[in-house]
Amino acid sequence: MRVLIPGIGGVLGRIVARRLLEQGHEVIGIDRRPWHDAPAGIELYNVDIRKRAAEDVFRKRRPQAVIHMATVTHLVERTEERFRINLGGTRAVFEHCRDWGVEHAIFVGRHTYYGAAADSPLYHKEEDPPMAVTTFPELSDLVAADLYACTALWRLPNLCTTVLRMVYTLGPTGHGTLATFLRGRHVPMVLGFDPLFHFMHEEDVAAAICLALEKRLQGVYNVAGPQPVPLSVVVRGTGRSPIPLPEIAFRAALGRFGLPKLPPGALAHIKYPVVVDSEAFRAATGFVHQVDEVRAMEAFRDAFPIRG
Amino acid sequence: MSLLIDPEIAARVDRLELPFNRYGVDPYGASKDHLARSFTALRFFYRHYFTVGVEGIHHVPVRGRAMLVGNHSGGVAVDGAMVFTSCFFELEPPRLAQGMAEKFMAKTPFMGLFAQRAGQLTGLVETAEHLLHDERLLMIFPEGARGTAKLYPERNTLVHFGSGFMRLAMKTRTPIIPFGFVGGGEAIPTIANSYTLGKLIGAPYVPITPWGVAVPAPVRLELTYSEAMTFEGTGTEEDEVIERYVEQVKQRIAGLIEEGRQRRRKALAWSRSTEDEARLGAEPSGTKEEQR
């Protein structure tokens, strides 16, 4: 199959691309970011997904499937630019899919869509509302992109659409929101709170995406691997030490003393859990994770050891 | 191992049939260490501080989904804690009864954390359904916060029962094991509820007792389980049907409370008469006076 991956330059995009190539697919990538040591056989286009040149790739290469990973999820990018990429980019991807005969489109979203709050259920089902817009307003563009992708299910009946809501990624590349949060020697926690964190190994994330492609899955699915574990366990399991700070001190200390910088909305996500129920995805694809939560933590710890 | 954990209890925690991972955490965040510590502390209250009479524990199934449904007794969760403890100590193999806590708990530092590590989650229909789907034992107080707000004179009465538990039980085909709890009102005789204090700390209210704070007194408690009740249906029936079923459960619980009261009265009368005999026999020193 000819598969186009917008956002191939990201860590996850690269893993997925390599995997698909191994499986004998023809892989084409679009990204503004370069990928210098890309394996031979992957066709790369260094263009912006929102620009004309990206549509040319669709028109000339006529991919059968598209895995849309060109969303900005880290919060360093200026917000307006982020909004443009996440919303404008997603719109462009689905329009090109419609215009150039793509059969299957996969949107790779995040489980943080559901938001973290004291009164949110522990295992989110796909039909739960996106509370992240209130609990974590900085994520509202990702919520909107997710919902926009969902509209393709009824707007574009000829296109098989899959919306995946993946839990946090953890693994040796140190990629992802959770891994960034865990990078330093000390990890701040809010005193008196220890929420469950749901994550899976990056290879399992890539395997799940490839499986959704293979099974030509249609619909909205939560994707998770092993069970969630409390943040304190994640911190210790990755060889870090937790620093529990009272909420007021926590707000003041972020971004200082070598602690990670986080937007104010992230606080709820460090106090309350976002845990998803991925039973529907498992039933539809037969997905079984290969790496359990303990080995995923160890893989991260070994790749980013704390010295001294 | 911590000094606060009794090795015997830790071994019993190991026998809980829950999918703990290598760190001893289950998929809902219950932690083996924390459970062992909690049960070590609770055993003191269960066996020594209070005198807990448990009747009909054999009605609680050892495996498979089930719902323990009972009355609230007392201003703080003495009832829930003792039901939780009885399922752990009296059942073979032990079972974890998982309560559905008030939402303010999750917002309060430490409270939510301790509750979650003991398997007590925020009371939400979605979470309850997921637990039942995983064949867990649920503990439900359909009176909710209205039930814990009962004052001392109302301690053995029942207030309005919500009907959510009935719809959920029918939808998930879960047997209901009614229980009646007596003595919580004597342990924490609420003379008033301060809603102002509650607002200050983020709780619905704070119970006030004759000795000020809601520290339970060491009294006799009676916990009575009855045989399971099952209701056929889908959970989407008309309100009248559901209300009728809820009423049946409520009546059963009222009967269990009465049974518990009689047992309690008898037990106290007996202990009083033996105390009297002891007093007659020996010098009349300060024996521990049981509360009524």
Image: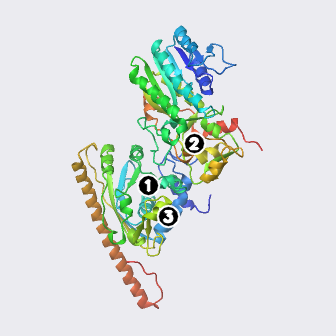
Which residue bears the numbered disc 2? A266
Looking at the image, which is closer to me, A176 or A39?
A: A176
Which residue is located at x 39 percent, y 86 percent? B276
User: Which quadrant of the structure image shows residue B83?
Assistant: bottom left
Quadrant in which the N terminus of chain B is drawn: bottom right
Q: In this view, does B285 lie above or below B224?
A: below
Which residue is located at x 33 percent, y 72 percent? B153
- Tell me: A123 left or right of A298: left
User: Disc 3, disc 2: CB below 8 Å?
Assistant: no
User: Disc 1, disc 2: CB below 8 Å?
Assistant: no
Amino acid marked by disc 3? Leu
Q: Which of marks 3 and 2 is in front?
A: 2
Residue B63 on image: x %, y %: 40, 49
Amino acid marked by disc 1? Ala
C-alpha separation, residue under disc 1 versus residue under disc 2: 25 Å
Q: Of the numbered discs in the image, which one, if any, rests on residue B101?
A: 1
Q: Of the numbered discs in the image, which one, if any, rests on residue B42?
A: 3
Residue A36 on image: x %, y %: 69, 19
Looking at the image, which is closer to me, B175 or B238?
A: B238
Which residue is located at x 44 percent, y 35 percent? A279
